[in-house]
Image (tube, rainbow, N blue to C red):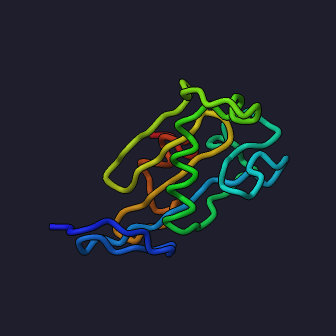
Amino acid sequence: MLTRLVFEGAHRVIVRGVALRFFLRTDRHNGTDNGDGSGIGTNNADVTNRPDSAWAPVTDIDFQHAYELAFFDPDALREDVLCPNARRVEHTTAEGWLWSDGCGSVGLCTFDDRTPDECAGMAQLTGKVTP
């Protein structure tokens, strides 16, 4: 039994013998991810299906921060208004857990020490391969 939950500030974290790795999707083309983990930027298209974006390894803390920001509408946040995000989605497969704010921020937590490329189920969700 876990006695307490603590962020480690690491990209790879072991929980009950399972290696979790954390990634955020970045947009190399037009700066959708402004680098602060918020996913707030200039382009509102979802980056999960863009060929010019890539998964970047991040710490568990950065991943959690971006995940929590995804609960709020990114357009409203730019205006300093907190509104629920109706575009937010989450998916889980045997290989990992993916979430998106529906605009420019996408996170992936992989299970069993996998890289994003090793997650066939996630690739199907993001449109990178056909089933």
Quarter of the image for residue 96 reads: bottom left
Percent position of residue 72, x then y = 58, 34
The residue shown at (58%, 46%) is 128
> In front: 31, or 78?
78
Residue 113's quadrant in the figure?
bottom left
Q: Position of residue 26 (x, y in %)?
A: 69, 54
Indicate whether 82 appears above or below 17: above
The N terminus sits in image quarter: bottom left
Residue extending farthest left: 1
For the residue pair 1 and 44, the one nearer the viewer reads as: 1
Q: Is residue 93 left or right of residue 67?
A: left
> What residue sits 50% from the left and 75% below the top?
10
Who's the residue at 85% across and 47% down the image? Answer: 30
Is 89 positioned to the left or the right of 44 in the image? left
Residue 83: percent from the left, percent from the top? 59, 26
**Left or right of 18 in this view: 109:** right
Q: Which of the image's four quarters has the C terminus?
A: top left
> Looking at the picture, does residue 40 appear above or below residue 86?
below
Asked if residue 118 is positioned above or below residue 27 in the image, the reply reads: below
- Judged left or right of residue 98, residue 30 is right
Q: How many marks?
A: 0
Q: Could you say which is closer to the camera, residue 100 or residue 40?
A: 40
Residue 101: % across, % down: 58, 37
Which residue corresponds to the image point at 59% horizontal and 56% vertical from the top-left? 24
